[in-house]
C-alpha cells in the first residue's frame, strides 16, 4: 500500500531528512541526527511535523455524555478551552488508544488520536457514540505542528496573534498564525514547554517556513521521530503499540490518575475498578542499566534466570547519558530498586528498577 504523505513531504526531503514508513505515513525520522535534535529541544526549540495524527470531532447536545461514556477520565471537570489526557478502553479494560481531548464547549469536543489508530479510533467512537452524538473524522482538514523547547513561546509569538503567555498548560485558544486560523494548545510530548498547532493543510508549507525563519536566532531546528521517541521516553510517557495496547490496561500502565472511577459508567470501568480493588498481575516499570547494553522493545526481562516480563521501550538517554527503558514485569518484582536482568543479544545485562520519569525538565509555562 502506498504511504500517505504530509503536506510537508517535499520540505522534509529538501531539508535532507531521512524518511521512513511510520503508521502508514512517510515521515522524517531525523535531519541532523537524533542526539543533536534531542538536545536542541531540551535547550532551545524544535519544530515537529505531526500532521499524521488524527482529529475526530464529537458534537451535539449530548456530546459530553458521549465523551464521558467513551473515556476513562472525567470530561465534566473540563473548562471550555481545556485539554485533557485520557484513554479509550475496550470492555475488558484493554486500551483502544490514549488521546488528548479538547473541549470547545459542552456540545463540541475534539479528540487528537495516534496516527496508527486514527481509523480504528474513528470506527470505535462512531460505533459507540454515533447514536447520541455527531462523530466526524476531520483528519484531512488539519496539518499539525508541535513546537517544543524553552524558547518555543518566543519563536511562535512572532507569527501568532494571541498573547501566548495567556494560554495555560493543557489549555488552548483559537487564533491566527500568520493571518491563518489555527487551534493553538500548550501541550506536547517532550516534557518541555511548547505548543501544538492545528492549521489548514494548504497553509502548512508557508507557516512551517516562517516559524523556522523567525526562530533562527533562537536556534530552532526541524525535529524527527527519532528524537521525539527519546524525548518522550526520558519523561516516561507511554507510546501506543509499546507501553499501551489492547492487551494492557491503564491500571497496569500506571495511569490510574487518568481513570475516574467515581464518574458514571464508561466502557471498561468494571474491569478497571476490579483491578484497583484486587490488584494486577503485571505492572509497567522504568529501569536503568547497571551493566553495558541498550535494551530494546521485546527484550526479555529476567529475575535469577526466570523470565518475569518484557521490555516495551529502551534507548540511550541523551540528557542523562545512560541507557534507560520501560517494560512490564510480574507485580511482585516491580518494587523500586529491584535488580533485574535484560536479555540483550544472547547475554543478560543487569538493570535496576527506577521511577519511570527519568529526566526532570523545568517548563516555564503556567501550570
Image (cartoon, rainbow, N blue to C red):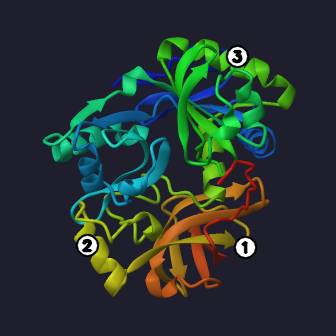
Image position of 117 (left or right of 82): left
Which quadrant would the C terminus be assigned to in this image? Answer: bottom right
Which of the two marks, 1 or 3, is nearer to us in this view? 3
- Judging depth in this view, the residue of 359 and 307 nearest the camera is 359
Residue 63 appears in the figure: yes
Mark 2, residue position: 271
Q: Residues within 10 Å of mark 3 (few under 14, many from 20)?
A: some
**In terms of secondary structure, where does tag 2 sit?**
helix
Q: CA distance from mark 2 to mark 3?
A: 49 Å
**In terms of secondary structure, where does tag 3 sit?**
helix
Residue 194: x %, y % from top left: 66, 41
Q: Is residue 92 above or below residue 278?
A: above
Tell me which corner region of the image, top left, top right, bottom left or bottom right, holds residue 124.
top left
Q: Residues within 10 Å of mark 2 (few under 14, many from 20)?
A: some
Which quadrant would the N terminus be assigned to in this image? Answer: top left
> Which circle's residue, 1 or 3, is located before the other in the chain?
3
Please state the total of marks drawn on the protein image: 3
Mark 1, residue position: 291
The disc at residue 155 is: none
- Judging depth in this view, the residue of 241 and 209 nearest the camera is 209
Q: CA distance from mark 1 to mark 3?
A: 46 Å
View extreme (left): residue: 131
Q: Residue at x 46, y 68 (%)?
A: 257
- Residues tagged 2 and 3 counted as in contact (Cβ below 8 A): no
Tell me which corner region of the image, top left, top right, bottom left or bottom right, holds residue 320.
bottom right
Q: Is residue 77 above or below residue 218?
A: below
Q: Is residue 111 above or below residue 262?
A: above
> Which circle's residue, 2 or 3, is located before the other in the chain?
3
Q: Residue at x 78, y 25 (%)?
A: 215
Mark 3, residue position: 210
Residue 189: x %, y % from top left: 59, 47
Amino acid at each position: 500500500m502506498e504511504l500517505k504523505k504530509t503536506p510537508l513531504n517535499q520540505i522534509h526531503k529538501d531539508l535532507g531528512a531521512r524518511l521512513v514508513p511510520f503508521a502508514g505515513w512517510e515521515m522524517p525520522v531525523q535531519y541532523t541526527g537524533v542526539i543533536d535534535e534531542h538536545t536542541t529541544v531540551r535547550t532551545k526549540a524544535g519544530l515537529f511535523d505531526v500532521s499524521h495524527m488524527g482529529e475526530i470531532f464529537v458534537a451535539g447536545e449530548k456530546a459530553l455524555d458521549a465523551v464521558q461514556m467513551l473515556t476513562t477520565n472525567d470530561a465534566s471537570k473540563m473548562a471550555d478551552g481545556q485539554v485533557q489526557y485520557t484513554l479509550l478502553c475496550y470492555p475488558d479494560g484493554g486500551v483502544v488508544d490514549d488521546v488528548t481531548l479538547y473541549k470547545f464547549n459542552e456540545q463540541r469536543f475534539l479528540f487528537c488520536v495516534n496516527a496508527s489508530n486514527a481509523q480504528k479510533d474513528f470506527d470505535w467512537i462512531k460505533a459507540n457514540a454515533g447514536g447520541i452524538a455527531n462523530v466526524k473524522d476531520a483528519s484531512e482538514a488539519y496539518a499539525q505542528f508541535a513546537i517544543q523547547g524553552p524558547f518555543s513561546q518566543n519563536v511562535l509569538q512572532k507569527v501568532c496573534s494571541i498573547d501566548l503567555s495567556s494560554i495555560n498548560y493543557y489549555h488552548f485558544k483559537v487564533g491566527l498564525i500568520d493571518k491563518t486560523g489555527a487551534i493553538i494548545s500548550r501541550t506536547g510530548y517532550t516534557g518541555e514547554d511548547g505548543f501544538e498547532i492545528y492549521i489548514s493543510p494548504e497553509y502548512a508549507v508557508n507557516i512551517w517556513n516562517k516559524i523556522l525563519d523567525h526562530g533562527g536566532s533562537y536556534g530552532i531546528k526541524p525535529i524527527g521521530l527519532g528524537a521525539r521517541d527519546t524525548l518522550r521516553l526520558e519523561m516516561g510517557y507511554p507510546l501506543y503499540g509499546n507501553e499501551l495496547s489492547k492487551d494492557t490496561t491503564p491500571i497496569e500502565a500506571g495511569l490510574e490518575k487518568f481513570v475516574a472511577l467515581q464518574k458514571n459508567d464508561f466502557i471498561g470501568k468494571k474491569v478497571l475498578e476490579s483491578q484497583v480493588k484486587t490488584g494486577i498481575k503485571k505492572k509497567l516499570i522504568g529501569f536503568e542499566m547497571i551493566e553495558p547494553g541498550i535494551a530494546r522493545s521485546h527484550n526479555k526481562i529476567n529475575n535469577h534466570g526466570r523470565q518475569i516480563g518484557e521490555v516495551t521501550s529502551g534507548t540511550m538517554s541523551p540528557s542523562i547519558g545512560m541507557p534507560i527503558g520501560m517494560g512490564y514485569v510480574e507485580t511482585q518484582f516491580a518494587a523500586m530498586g529491584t535488580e533485574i536482568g535484560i536479555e540483550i543479544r544472547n547475554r543478560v545485562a543487569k538493570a535496576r528498577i527506577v521511577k519511570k520519569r527519568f529526566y526532570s525538565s523545568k517548563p516555564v509555562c503556567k501550570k
